[in-house]
Amino acid sequence: MFNNPIPMQLSIVIPCLNEARTLRTCIRKAKAFLAASGIRGEIIISDNGSSDGSLNIAAEEGVRLLHAPEKGYGMALMHGMNLAEGSFIVMGDADDSYDFLDLQPFVEAHERGGDLVIGNRFLGGIEKDAMPFLHRYLGNPVLTGIGRLFFKAGIGDFHCGLRGISKSAYEALDLKMPGMEFASEMIVKASLKGLKIVEVPTRLYPDAPGRKPHLNTWRDGWRHLRFLLLFCPRWLFFYPGLLLAAAGVLVALLLTVRDLAFPGFMLGVHTQFYTLILAGIGLQMCFFSLLGRYLGELRGIFRVHGRHQRLIRYIRSASGFWSGMVLFAGGLLLGAQALQFWAERHYGSLDPSVTFKTILPSGFLLLFGFQLMVACMFLNLCQLFMNIRQEGASQ
């Protein structure tokens, strides 16, 4: 720790993996900014296994050199940020694609109350050849649009590599993602926790000639997309599941009454079979979404949502369990009716187009009722384990 009574104001964390071409330039720009602004700060190089002389450059420049214990962009940043001593942390890449001389807007946005300050390259300008065509016109707009829709973040550039965050906000977010999806995790969790997120225009410059990009377009794009989807189970599971369940049940009910004839084809019992399977899949998706959201709320990842909480309380309560029992009993009654129909025909062969109109709804009600009862027990089990954990931590 520093003995200077003046607290450290700013930590500039630069992740590094074989960036000898540009690292010295980035360090000197960061030094020049600190000198010109009069801010008491530190420069941290969080190395991720460099073998090209980057370590020697960091040592020669006299900055803090840390060695991330595990590979990955997110791991390098987290290691540096965990050990950073500044009250505000700015992170930026070591490839000189961002100008460390231009950090004043980030500091000022933080001083105005911004917990997380994100650069926006589309507002600040993108130099020629600085961003690949697919990233500029497909990857970034699509992933940013999904993030804005799912999490209401109001951010125009989810993946800008130049950003700042207060040390207290960083600690509150409890970030975990080891790879490039770390960038999405930071914004998503900040949005879910209601932190103040501010954007500032940032200019993007081309990489140094001959530098091989660390970003893999399709692999890292998929990891970002997967993270966004998993952190918003409503859009990935609940809404599609609800649509499947509603459509499946509606069509199945119509087919229970009578076959549906259309020009050139007819929908009957075979269609009813598949619509009820789709409805079962939809219900399973809904339950999975609710359970995932509930676990996230218990762990403090998601903010508590009123309507969701009411639905969870109902499913977890005795009323939810008995609702499942009633549905299950309805399935048994329809099954008994089908069995009686078979007995009246002396247990001989039956016409599936007739019997399946009873058997299929029976199977669906059995499945739905059982799912509801299991969901009730699982939610109560989660709550029990959480209570036990909290009691153990308080002792």
Image (cartoon, rainbow, N blue to C red):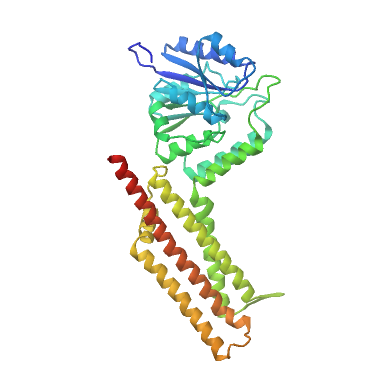
Query: x, y percentage for residue 90?
Result: 47, 23
In the image, 87 versus 2, the foreground residue is 2
The single residue placed furthest to the left in the displayed view is 395
Query: x, y percentage for residue 178?
Result: 53, 33
Residue at image x 64%, y 34%?
A: 135
Residue at image x 47%, y 22%?
A: 105
Query: x, y percentage for residue 298?
Result: 38, 47
Query: x, y percentage for residue 30?
Result: 51, 14
Q: Is 211 situated left or right of 272 in this image?
A: right
Q: Quadrant of the N terminus?
A: top left
Q: In this view, does 165 lie above or below 307?
A: above
In the image, 281 versus 245, the foreground residue is 281
Residue 220 appears in which quarter of the rendering?
top right
Q: In this view, does 368 lie above or below 132?
A: below
Q: Is residue 116 above or below residue 210?
A: below
Q: Can residue 17 be seen in this view?
A: yes
Q: In which quarter of the image is the C terminus?
A: top left
